[in-house]
Image (cartoon, rainbow, N blue to C red):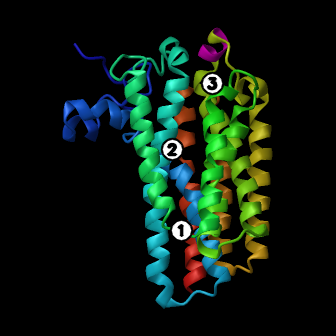
Amino acid sequence: MSPSPDPAGLIAGTDMPAQSWIDRLLPRPARPYARLMRLDRPIGTWLLLFPGWWSIALAFEVLEWRWNSAGLFLWFMALFGVGALLMRGAGCTWNDIADREFDARVERTRTRPIPSGQVSVKQALAFMALQMAVAFGILLQFNGFAVLVGVASLAVVFVYPLMKRVTYWPQVVLGLAFNWGALLGWAAVRGDLGWPPVLLYIAGIFWTLGYDTIYAHQDKEDDILIGVKSSALKLGANTRPWLWTFYGLAAVLIAAAGWLDGLGPLFWIGFGLGALQLGWQAARVDIDDPADCLRIFRSNRVFGWCLLLGLTADLMQ
């Protein structure tokens, strides 16, 4: 008898969907690798991708958009989309390799491919290398400066899984990694860096501090038992005012980036809607309800789209 799903559609007590397109469409040998990449849980890819897309739009604004630039704009967006999918997959694979002993002891993660024995560590390492090789081929489509910026991100990516062992703020390191696209997008378009992408990058770090603190509240009981740290454990019952702080700083810095870039009213409409969505998260989340934490965490896709639509609408007017 297979495990029954909970109301969110997950196998009870885990973060694995009870049924997904992976089970319906992929051959059995490929399924554990698709799950290593979290292909059935795309929210992580969106969260990694949005800062890069925002930055591309910012950089094209500075270049004074012309409609004959549309093809190049869409090409850059597509390359970043595939690159984010691969790098998120490689990062999740590395995270599962590093955390395999912890994952086996945490109810929510015990059915992941490595702790459950579906994929060996050697197989996972080879799969990670393959993903990174393809992602590097995509990175080579950009200018030399962008290639250097992209390669520099690897140090943060590889350090992140170790941080929960030594600090209550691994979410800061995740923010450094997940928002690197804010630097890379601008570099890919412009071949340099400037204050708008730097402010966007720092804003993204605060954004990540907010949403990943919410996410970490799902695991706080298990984290205490196995001895790993998180911002959720550090902040505890004081999480809500800190969410307002993190999201407020993110909004201020994004606004500063937009102001420096000379963005118009369509951007500010999208930004305003996104800021309201962040405020809704901080006001609404129940940090003692894992299902609600997951739902609010996933809602950050709405914030990402609000900001992106504002940026692209302003760019094309």
Specify the principal SS of the magenta part: helix
Residue shown at 39% from the left, 36% from the top: 127
Label drawn at residue 288: 3
Task: Tell me residue 4's x, y (percent).
Answer: 31, 19
Q: Is residue 32 magenta?
A: no
Label 2, label 3: how far apart the Cα atoms are: 22 Å
Task: Tell me residue 94's x, y (percent).
Answer: 51, 32
Task: Say if residue 271 shows up in the picture.
Answer: yes
Of callouts 2 and 1, which one flags the residue occurring earlier in the amino acid sequence? 2
Q: Is residue 192 above or below residue 228?
A: below
Q: Nearer the viewer, residue 53 or 307?
A: 53
Check the picture and name the quadrant holding the C terminus.
Answer: bottom right
Q: Secondary structure at mark 3?
A: loop
Q: Is residue 224 magenta?
A: yes
Label drawn at residue 44: 2
Of callouts 2 and 3, which one flags the residue occurring earlier in the amino acid sequence? 2
Residue shown at 53% from the left, 35% from the top: 294
Q: Secondary structure at mark 1?
A: loop
Label drawn at residue 142: 1
Task: Tell me residue 276's x, y (percent).
Answer: 66, 57
Q: Which residues are magenta?
A: 221-225
Mark whose residue sits in front, 2 or 1:
1
Task: Tell me residue 8's x, y (percent).
Answer: 41, 32
Check the picture and name the quadrant holding the N terminus.
Answer: top left
Q: Amino acid at mark 1?
A: Phe
